[in-house]
Image (spheres, rainbow, N blue to C red):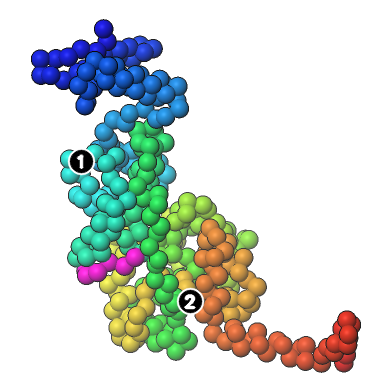
Amino acid sequence: MTVNKHDNGKWYCKFTIRGVTKHLLCAGATTEKEALEIENAFKYKLQQQLNGVIPKNQKNVYFNRLKELYIKHAKTNHKKYKNQIYYINALEKYFNNGKPVNTIKPEHIQKYIEYLRYSGKRGKRKNSSINRFLEILSKMFNLAIDNGELTENPLRKIPPLKEDNHRPRFLLDDEEIRLFASIDTFAPYLRPIVTTALETGMRRGEIFGMKWCNIDFINRNIYVLDTKSGESREVPITDKMYDLLQSLPKNSEYVFTNPKTNKPYVDIKKSFNMVKEHAQIENFHFHDLRHTFATRMLSVDINNLYPLMEILGHTNIETTMRYSHIVPGRKMEAIKKLKNYNKLYTTISGNCVTIQE
């Protein structure tokens, strides 16, 4: 007999299928017949699982396992892995609560979003910041799914929060004059660094990491190797940039080094903020020098979108296109081009269209 009644009055079943043995409680059974029916249901489910028709019963997975899988992945695939430590630690603080992560539902994620919204040390978090947490958490679940340890990602049905598409800030002509005057007075060593940002559109970290061996003076190219996307790119050298590079001392393998340490700069935030303050330039960051380069390039020729995309290292044209909306005078220039067509007009007679001078 595969079913039997224990002294506690409950019915149990024990059976083996294809080497898999199960010993289960026939919950709710009051007679042998009912216990056999429940046993048959258990057998059918096991056969379906063994045949791959339905997923096998899932073992509990805890956050530490998600963290382990993600760290292994990130160390291999993300150059900026160390920057993600903050997010990983914050996720661990919230989800490493002794409960299996396979019990997390979309409603729990919604509660976490609300928690993130108001738990920041600097006040209410922006959607863009919250999305970074959710992106990493979702990747953790997907890695566990790929590894066969989970079957569902509770974030799959939760769309990213709409991020604030603020207007990129760029340096105005009069602001540039004041900025360089302030630099020459209070921090002269910033002039070549800021000039490089304005002439190349390179990111701060890319400028700090630039080596002389990355510069081709003959073909006038800078080879940017350590990039945000992980893809190398070429940045053309303008005449002004060429003269600047030729004038700099070559005492190190790096182009820009701190004279006090003879090592590459790590951060210039304090001194950059100081020269901005003296120049009376508000709401402007070093990264906005990159925005300035982009808008100036497009103001010369709006058809430079794809070359600009390659120079900036964008992975999709949509990112680059946002600059086309803020180029000063661009819309007016487009309207003015209509004057070339003012000599022509059309008349419609019946089904015929006639173009006349």
Place of residue 191 in the rendered image (x, y in percent of width and height, measured from the top left): 41, 75
Q: Is residue 21 left or right of residue 242?
A: left
Q: Is residue 317 above or below residue 151?
A: below
Range covered by the magenta-colored residues: 122-127
Disc number at residue 99? 1
Residue receiving disc 2: 292
Q: Is residue 123 magenta?
A: yes
Residue at the extreme top of the image, as rendered: 1
Place of residue 291 in the rendered image (x, y in percent of width and height, measured from the top left): 47, 73
Disc number at residue 306? none
Quick one: 228 or 60, which is closer to the camera?
Answer: 60
Q: Secondary structure at mark 2?
A: helix
Residue at the spot 19% in from the left edge and 65% down from the top edge: 121
Amino acid carrying label 2: it is: Thr
In the rendered image, which quarter is residue 306 located in?
Answer: bottom right
Residue at the spot 44% in from the left edge and 77% down from the top edge: 167
Mark found first going from the N terminus, 2 or 1: 1
Viewer-nearest of discs 2 and 1: 1
Amino acid carrying label 1: it is: Lys
